[in-house]
C-alpha cells in the first residue's frame, strides 16, 4: 500500500492545509502573462529603463528585459505593468 493511502488526514490537518500560510516569498515572485500583442508583468521593484524598443524592470533578485517594436505602456501601478507592442524576446539576469 502506498504512503498516501496509509496516511489519512484528520479534519484538523485538512483545515490546516486549507487555511495555511503560503510559502515565504510567494507574492514576490514575478509573473508574466502574454495575450496577443499585450504583456502583463507583476511583482517588480521599479522600471530601470524604457523606450519604444526596450523595457527593463528591476525584480526582487534580478532584472527582466523585454525587447520589441513599438512598445507602449498601457497601465502602470505599484507592482504591475501592462505593455502593448510586438515582442521579440525577453531576458532575465540574476543579481549576483
Image (tube, rainbow, N blue to C red):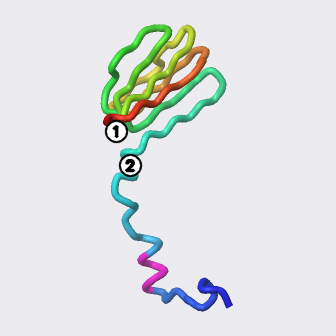
Residue shown at the point (39%, 13%) measured from the top left = 50
Judge whether residue 13 is colored magenta: yes
Residue shown at the point (49%, 26%) measured from the top left = 91
Pick the front one: 87 or 1 = 1
Q: Which residue is mark 1?
A: 61
Point out which mark residue 27 bears. 2
Residue shown at the point (31%, 32%) measured from the top left = 45
Name which quarter of the figure residue 15 lies in. bottom left
Q: Where are the magenta residues, as a range?
A: 12-16
**Quadrant into which the C terminus falls:** top left
**Quadrant into which the N terminus falls:** bottom right
Percent coordinates x, y for residue 21 in the rendering: 37, 65
- Against 58, residue 23 (above or below) is below
Residue extending furthest toward the front? 96
- Against 29, residue 89 (above or below) is above
Name which quarter of the figure residue 84 lies in. top right
Percent coordinates x, y for residue 85 in the rendering: 57, 15
Question: For the residue labelled by badge 2, is the local secondary structure a helix, a strand or a loop?
Answer: helix
Percent coordinates x, y for residue 87 in the rendering: 59, 19
Percent coordinates x, y for residue 92 in the rendering: 46, 30
Judge whether residue 56 is colored magenta: no
Give the spatial CA distance, label 2 vs label 1.
Answer: 13 Å
Amino acid at each position: 500500500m502506498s504512503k498516501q493511502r496509509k496516511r489519512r488526514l484528520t479534519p484538523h490537518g485538512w483545515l490546516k492545509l486549507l487555511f495555511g500560510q503560503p510559502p515565504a516569498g510567494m507574492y514576490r515572485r514575478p509573473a508574466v502573462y502574454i495575450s496577443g500583442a499585450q504583456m502583463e508583468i507583476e511583482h517588480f521593484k521599479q522600471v530601470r529603463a524604457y523606450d519604444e524598443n526596450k523595457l527593463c524592470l528591476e525584480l526582487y533578485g534580478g532584472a527582466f528585459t523585454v525587447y520589441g517594436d513599438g512598445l507602449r505602456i498601457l497601465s502602470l501601478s505599484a507592482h504591475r505593468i501592462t505593455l502593448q507592442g510586438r515582442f521579440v524576446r525577453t531576458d532575465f539576469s540574476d543579481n549576483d
